Image (cartoon, grey):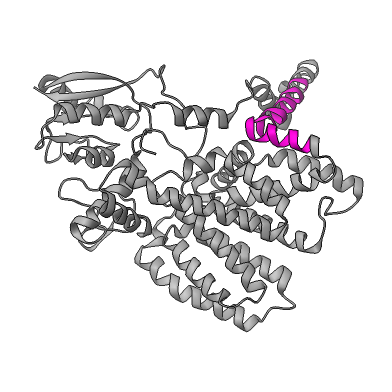
Amino acid sequence: MANQYLWQDEAENAVIARNILRFGYPRAFDGSLLVVSDIGYRKDYTWIFQPWLQNYLTAFSFCIFGGSSLSARLPFVLFGIASFASAYFLARRMFSLMTARVFLVIMLTCVPYLLMIRQARYYSLALFFALLLIHGYLDYAEKKRFADIKILASSFLLFNSNFGLFFPLAAGLIFHRIVFYRREADMKKDAGLILLTALILVPIFIYFKGWLHEVPLSADFVLGNVKFYLRSINRYIVPIRLIAVFYLVFAIMKRTFWPFVASYSDKRNISLILFIFVTTVLFMGIAKFRSLRYAIYLIPLLGILESYFLARWMNHGRVLASLCIVLLVTTNLFHQSLTDIFVKSVSGAFVNLSGKYDFEKQGGILEKMTEKAKERASEKNSIRSYFGEYLYEISHDYDGPIEGIVTYLKENAVETDRVKIPYGDCAVAFYTGLKVDNDMTPGKDPYPEWIIPRDYWTSKGFYSSDYYKEIQKKYEKIVLEYPDLRWENRPDDLGYHNFRTVSDYPKKVVIYKKK
C-alpha cells in the first residue's frame, strides 16, 4: 500500500482531508494551493466537487496514524476487504454455496478489484455501500424487519460516497421491483420509501450542485461511452462476448430463454444483476467522464453471475470447468485473446474478399467495412496474465514521476520554497509541505524557486511563450531519471496501468531550479 506514491486524485483527497484537520471543514484552499474544481466552491472555498465521506474518513485516519500514503489508503483497503466479504455472502444468498466458492476464486484474482480497493478514494466506500443497498433490497423483498432502515442508511452513505453511482443502481433495483414483485408489493409502502429516500438525498444533491456535472450530449458521445464500458468489462472483468455466444447457442439448442437456469429464484436474481448492469451502462453513457471506477459495483455482481454459470457447469463436468476457471483467473484468453483471434481471422478473410471484388471502389458501407476489417486484421493480440503481472507489481518497487519529483524536492528544496506545477500539485503539496501553485501562467508569482512543466499537462503554447524564454534564462534545467508519465499509476483501467516501472518512456521529468 505504501510503495507507490499517491497519484493526483488520491492526493486531492489527502489534501482536502488534511485541510479538514487544519480548518475544521473540507476547504479547497490552504492559503497557497487551490485544489481545482470544475464546478467551483461554496463559501470560504468549501469543497463540493465530490461528497465528503471519503475526506472525513481519510482525516480520521490521519488523526490517528498521521499523514502518509499508508494511512491515506488503509481505511479504504479495510472497506474493500469488507466489500469482498459482503459480496461473498451475497453470492451465497442469491444462488448457492458452490457459486460463492467459485466467486471467492474469481474475485481474489480480479485485478481491477484488487487495484481499486487500495486507492485512497471513494471506490471501496461506494462498493461496500452499494452491496449493502442490494442486501437491503433483498431483505425488503423478503419482508424482513428493519429492511427499510437498511435501505435508507445504505442509500445515504452511498450517496455521500459518490452520488453518480447511486442513481443507476437505484434505477435497477426499482425496475426489478416493478417487474418481479408488482403483484405482491405494497405499492403505497414502496412509494413512501422512495419518497423518503428522495427527501433525504435531494438536499445533499442541491448542496453539492450536482447538476453542474453536465456534459454536452450527442449520440456519438453516448455511444462511445457505452462501447467503452462494454469493451472494458469484457477485457478486464467478465468475458461477456463469449458468454453471449454460448448463451445464444444453448438458447437455440434448448429452445428456451433461460438455458442455464435451475429455478425461478435463480431467474429473478440473475435478472437483478442484469437490470443493474443495463441501467448502469446506459446511465454512464451520459456521464461526463468514463472509467471503470464509476461502475465498480458491477465487478462483484458480474463476478457472481459468472460464478453461477461456472458452478452450474461444475455439476456436469468438474474437471473441464475447473480448467476453465484456472484459465479465466490466470490469463485473458477468454476475455480478449480468443474472441480477438476469431475477429481477426474473419476480418482477414473479409479483406481478402474485398481485394477480390474491389469493395473499396464501390463506396458506401462496403468501403467502411473494409477499412474497419483492415484495422482489426492488423491488430496484434497476445495472451496476458494480469494477475501474474499484479503479483510482480506488489513484490517489486515502482518508480513514477511523482516519486521522482518529491524525492528531489525533499533533498534540495528548503521549507520556504515555492513550486509551480500544473499536475501532481496535490501530491507535491501533501508530501513536501511546500507552497504549491498549479497555475502555469505568470500570474501573481511568475518566478518561484521551482517550476515543473509536466509534459502532458503543459500546453504547447507555454514552450513558445516569452514567459518560458525568461524561465530558460533565470533557471537551471534539471532532468530526472523518472518517466514523465501522464499519471503516477492510474488504477482504474488496465490499459493505463503500469505493473512495473516504465523504463523506455521517451519523456523524462524536467525540473527548473531558480539560479
Which residue is at the front of the view, 17 or 170?
A: 17
In the rendered image of this protein, does residue 229 appear above or below residue 88? Answer: above
In the picture provided, is 209 more to the left or to the right than 276? left
The residue located at (24%, 37%) in the rendering is: 428
Q: Is 385 placed above or below 195 here? A: above
Residue 308, visible in the rendered structure = yes
Which picture quadrant has residue 253? Answer: top right
Q: Position of residue 287 (x, y in %)?
A: 50, 51
Magenta residues, start to end: 320-349
Residue 255 vertical placement versus 169 (above, below): above
Q: Give the residue drawn at x 68%, y 45%.
A: 102
Quadrant of the rendered image containing residue 271: bottom right
Residue at image coords 18%, 51%: 30
Residue 348 falls within the magenta-colored stretch: yes
> Is residue 459 at all visible to an observer of this figure?
no
Q: Residue at x 50, y 44 (%)?
A: 291
- Quadrant in which the N terminus appears: top left
